[in-house]
Structures are given as C-alpha cells and as structure tokens.
Image (cartoon, rainbow, N blue to C red):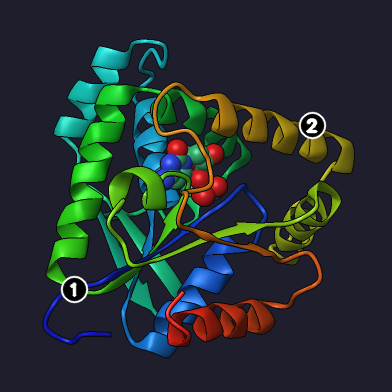
Amino acid sequence: MVKDIPQAITIDGPAGAGKSTVARELARRLGVFYLDTGAMYRALTLKAVRLGLNLEDASGLVDLARRTRIRLENHHSGTKVLLDGEDVSEAIRSPEVTNKTFYIARAGGVREIMVGWQREIGARQSIVIEGRDVGTVVFPEAARKFYLDADFEVRARRRIKELREKGKQVDEDSLKRELQERDHKDFTRAVGPLKVADDAVVIDTTPLTVDGTVDEILKHIKNGA
Ligand code: DC
C-alpha cells in the first residue's frame, strides 16, 4: 500500500460470513486500522433503546446521531466501542440490540451521518473497513473490494458457536429465524442495502478458515485484484 495516501480495503457481506474476524486479522497483518461499521449502528441503537426513543421516528434518530460520539479503539483483546465515552463493547452485542439495529440502519439520515464518520476515519489513515455498504456507498472508489459470503447453515452455526463460547444460551431455531430476518432486512433496505459492488471480489468462506480467507484476500491484493 502507498504509505502517504490513506487506502481503504472494503469487506461487505451478510451476518455470519466471517467479516469481523477476517477484517480484524487482515488489518493486523497489514498494520492498518480495523473499522467495524456495524459497531457504530449497534452503539447508536443501544443509546436509542436506553433512552426509550421511538425507533420508528427517523428524524428523532437523526437528532440523536448528531448529539452522539462513537469512538472505536483497536486493542489486542478486540475492538473497544466507546459511546459518549462509555465502554459498550459487550452491551452492543446483546440480542435486543442485534434485533433492533435495523431501525437505525434503515434511517437514511442516520446512514448519512454514519457514512460521514466512516469517511473521516478513512481519510486519516489506511483502513480495513467492514459492513454492508462499505464498498458500494462509503468508499465506492476503494481500490480493493471484497464480498464475503457463506451458506446459510454455516453462517448460523458460526453465530451459534460464537454465542456459546461467550457462555450465552442459544435457541438454534430462533437464532436461524432471526438471521433470516436480518438477511431480508439487509438486502431489501431502501438505503444502503447489502449488495455486491460491481468491482468486488466475491469469496465463499463456507469451506475456509479465517486464516484461509485472509490468505485468499492477500493473494488477490498482491495480484492486483
Ligand atoms: O455487522 P453487524 O452484525 O455488527 O451489523 C449490525 C447491523 O448493522 C446489521 O444488521 C445491519 C447494520 N449495518 C448496516 O446497515 N450497515 C453497515 N455498514 C454495517 C452494519
């Protein structure tokens, strides 16, 4: 990568395709900042839920975004998410936040603000950025774009494993139902829907490990994908 000009590598894809772990490891290997855009949408959702706001009221959510500071810090132990200075890294992963983030994600005015924050971070430094619209909307000019996908069953199993490893109780049927609903909302949102950028490299991670996926991405980068 060119040292003086910040570059963005974008990774989009559905929930459970392995984006977060892959993006974090890729950023570590390249020595650049890892930007988890989903964490921003989740953090704002958490704030709106705590305040008891009407999640159907898009203009109220835009006002909320305007008076909110979200900061992401990368540490060895993972990404620390600071919501107005409070560490909410764990709280934003709750099932309630996971299932309510779509209200924030579908509000066009909120997305504009989020995209602005993400571009500011990308203007300061090279990044690996991960989300749903990062190659299509946030950094359409990015030189390296990837779209990670995997079979539905595999994505569901990964989520189940992740939650169980954190000691959470998981009902497999409801998790699958919720994942299906999230997929539907991600693909059909009027603004910033999940789609494959024309110039993205699509990688099916179904048979791949995290390291295998990162190796594959690095191979494309070196070959000038
Ligand atoms: O990647 P994640 O599961 O943490 O994302 C949480 C939700 O945030 C996801 O269901 C959709 C939304 N999101 C979005 O709309 N745009 C992004 N760039 C990232 C996430």
Which secondary structure, mark 1?
Answer: loop
Q: Which mark is residue 6?
A: 1
Q: Residues within 10 Å of mark 1 (few under 14, many from 20)?
A: some
Q: Position of residue 216 (x, y in %)?
A: 61, 80
Q: What is the CA distance from the residue labelled 1 to the residue labelled 2?
A: 40 Å
Residue 85 visible in this rendered orientation of the protein: no
Whether pointer 1 and pointer 2 mark residues with C-beta atoms closer than 8 Å, the reply is no
Mark 1 or mark 2, whichever is nearer to me: 1
In the foreground, 66 or 106 = 106
Q: Residues within 10 Å of mark 2 (few under 14, many from 20)?
A: few
Residue at horizontal 48%, vertical 33%? 193
Q: Is residue 25 left or right of residue 17?
A: left
Which secondary structure, mark 2?
Answer: helix
Residue at horizontal 24%, vertical 14%? 59
- The image quarter containing residue 207 is bottom right
Q: Which residue is mark 2?
A: 177
Q: Amino acid at mark 1?
A: Pro
Q: Is residue 160 left or right of residue 106?
A: right
